[in-house]
Image (tube, coloured by chain):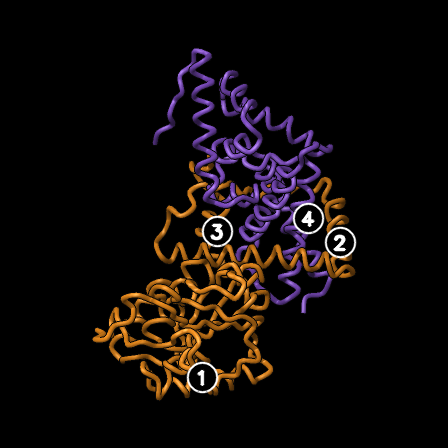
Amino acid sequence: MSHEDGPLPLPNTPRADGMEKIMAAFRSSLARMDADPAEAARIRELAGRSDAEIVQQRLREEAGDVSADPVRPELRLLARADMAVPGGADRVRALIIVDVQNDFCEGGPLAVAGGAAVARSISTLLASGGHGYDHVVATKDYHIDPGSHFAASPDYIRSWPAHCVAGTSGSDFHPDLATGPIEAVFRKGAHAAAYSGFEGVADDGTPLTDWLRARGVDTVDVVGIATDYCVRATAADAAANGFSARVLLGLTAGVAPGTTAEAITALRDTGVAVSPA
Amino acid sequence: MLSNEELNREIESLALECWDALRQYLRGSRFLLPADIVDEVINDSLLVVAHKRRRGHTLTNPKAYLFVVARNAAVDRLKGLYAVEVPDSPAVEWMCGRTGMLAEAQVSLTLELAIERLPLRQRQVIELRYLRDFSVAETAEILGIAEGTVGPTTTSAIRKLRQFLEEHGETWKEETG
């Protein structure tokens, strides 16, 4: 019963008989779609879901995961067909602003050079009417007792000086970050290290993935601090969760050039696009 | 901008080329959709293509795109069918088709009986996973349950099927490979 024996056949089987009836039904449905916003929304949703699936399949194919879906003949067919992913107009896009907090900017205990400038640049982007994002969210490092993530003598690889402690001004967003457009904040790391924004939850406990999916988001841009740690982990998780992900490098700041370059290579290897801005 | 006439011509050409293969796909053992629902699914899929084309998208392989959309639309319909507790008319037709599916799968009468005696959710999981070849994720999506629930439900169902078969003098054959 499985279709693993070969691709689904797509014969050229003209079926002139009855085609008039089929086309009449189609034209009538098209008119109904134009007249009824709910019907149009249903078709848009079906289109968006299908586009997202194609993007995910392409990412899996590009990652060499050919066994990802062994019983889906239509997707195997698609992989072979080298079909262009439909354009971006139907994408639902979100901007994820990672950890643009006082403690990661100049003057903080874990200051990343250029952190405050990143806050300003993101604000400039959001102030422009045509930024094109359907949703804007932010993540926050928000530590209560993160265990060995904090250390008196940190190694700056796995342990760090105390930072972004819950309730302190260090955990606040940098004052130059425009917070008006931010619809939800996802806090992470209360009781353990958490680099990825996808480990965070909103005030009502909703994880970032669920929040984005509930709004039909299929494409995310990731910006913020630090390129080589939390931005990297967040973008990698975005791709792993099936989102089409991109890091806007010009809107990030990295801890060190070496680890930042390594992060860019690793992200590209996992299907995340890295663009200058 | 595509005129309505051009759009209709494109869609008609696509429908001519794909209609039979799509019907075969949607009537086949995975979806086993009733004929009227198949036509609705194909119509919805053509609407999606029309929507994309009107917005200026170029589909380098519209046939393949049509199949992906049809699959998603079909899953939506399956969700509706699995949610029906008091069968209405399409569901009745679908249930009849389902019996044919068991025969096609060369399931022994005893196993068929065993499947029919399973609690509803377990029967649905067995059907979707083993008779229709849906993945765990797809099964969860169609039934509206968590992916993590599919595994334990399958295990319980198989335990019951095995027990029923053994009680009736048949052995449970593990599928390998």
Label placed on residue A78: 3
Q: Is residue B44 found left or right of B135 in the rendered image?
A: right
What amino acid is at disc 4? Asn
Labels 2 and 4 positioned on one and the same chain: no
Q: Quadrant of residue B5?
A: bottom right
Read off the residue under disc 4: B43
The hue of chain B in the figure is: purple
Q: Is residue A139 found left or right of A103 in the rendered image?
A: right
Labels 1 and 4 positioned on one and the same chain: no
Residue A219 image position (x, y, % from top left): 50, 66
Closest to the camera, between mark 2 and mark 1, is: 1
Read off the residue under disc 1: A174
Closest to the camera, between mark 3 and mark 1, is: 1
Read off the residue under disc 2: A27
State the residue at coordinates (64%, 38%).
Answer: B81
- Image quarter hosting the N terminus of chain B: bottom right
Q: Is residue A57 above or below residue B124?
A: below
What amino acid is at disc 3? Leu
